Image (tube, rainbow, N blue to C red):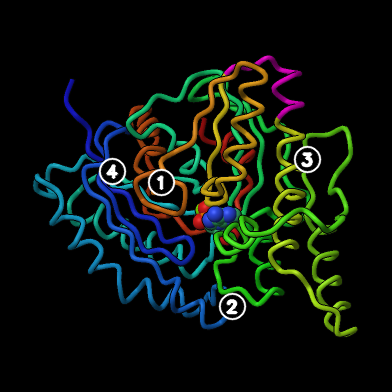
Amino acid sequence: MKDVYILAIETSCDETSMAIVKNGKKVEALTILTQMDTHANYGGVVPEIASRMHTENITLVLEETLKKFSKKIEEIDAIAVTYAPGLLGSLLVGVECAKTLSLVYNKPLIAVNHTMGHIYANNIDNDIKYPSLALIVSGGHTDLLILNSPDNMEILGSTIDDSVGEVFDKVARVLNMPYPGGPNIEKAAGKGKNSYELPKPMMDETYNFSYSGLKSYMINLVHNETQRNHKININDLACSFQITAVEELTRKVEKALKNTGIKNFILAGGVSANNYLRAEMQKICEKYNVEFHVPNILYCTDNAAMIGCAAYPLFKARKFADFSLNAKSSENIKNYVEKNL
Ligand code: AMP
Ligand code: MG
């Protein structure tokens, strides 16, 4: 069978990334240009700056990616792009670039949901096994789903308010740590001990998550202690926060593994770069004799390789987009699954 090469584009937030992926598995070329240092000056991503920087960088990233590819652009079989969810102006830059390449080189266009990309990062140099339980934890998502087969997924639960990554970032900000907060919280937590009593997020019977209560509690605690001139032990507070935030995830994952009997677990999304989270999930998997899968750290945060992987089953099913394709700032993964799979 002929090899399939997909050129993928990802611009949903503050990374301009392109990749060429062979057969939905092998990364032939990958470029990630992050704007993190610029946004760090503002304590978070500034959407207008993000889209302007994507516009400035996208042709450079294309050139760089093609340089790394051993074949000619004409040998690429399709152009894939993240069209949702994300920052609208940022997504638009990627979508317009994809449409242009598709038109100029006469290649089919494939529209990919960013969250599906995070799941498919687990297919890189690997095979997603079915059925799998998947937890997606990122700056925009906290979703627990069952992957029954490549075209059959069900959502067990999602966050009802903030995503876990967002809360790591907000808590880091109130503790005066630079953006992005997650890795800085992890670093501080590694030096601290669990000495703060924090509220347990969502002690209910569903598979949903909730982080707004923990976030408000953390912000209020820091403000109150500061106003009273009390010293905060930042490392200890980061440690207690990380444990509480992760416990919310492990509790629901454990319940799902117990209730479904599924023997494969996939962790995906930017927060899965967190070593404490990885270790806790690993422990639960060992307890239930479940295979634990997490992408290489390079493919955990936003990158176009994962988009090229997620595009492959759509290519095989000839599910192509036309030039009416538009960016969408939000798209529930449930709607995407129902519409596309
Ligand atoms: P994504 O939305 O998939 O690009 O992931 C970005 C999110 O992952 C941001 O909210 C980061 O703070 C978070 N993140 C990245 N590394 C870590 C880490 N080591 N610990 C916790 N959160 C992290
Ligand atoms: Mg992401």
Q: Earlier in the sequence, mark 2 or mark 4?
A: 2
Name which residue type carries label 3.
Asn
- Label tally: 4
Q: Which residue is mark 1?
A: 299
Q: Secondary structure at mark 2?
A: loop
Q: Secondary structure at mark 4?
A: loop
Horizontal placement of 212 versus 41: left or right?
right
Residue shown at 69% from the left, 22% from the top = 257
Q: Is residue 168 left or right of residue 61?
A: right
Which tag, 4 or 3, sits closer to the chain's start?
Answer: 4
Question: Magenta segment, principal secondary structure?
Answer: helix
Q: Earlier in the sequence, mark 1 or mark 2?
A: 2
Q: Amino acid at mark 4?
A: Pro
Q: Which residue is mark 4?
A: 108
Q: Is residue 296 above or below residue 12?
A: above
Residue 209, percent across and down?
A: 77, 44
Query: Which stretch is magenta?
Result: 254-263
Upstream in the sequence, badge 3 or badge 1? Answer: 3
* Label annotation for residue 43: 2
Asked whether the beta carbons under mark 4 and mark 3 sit within 8 Å of each other, the answer is: no
CA–CA distance in space, label 1 to label 4: 25 Å
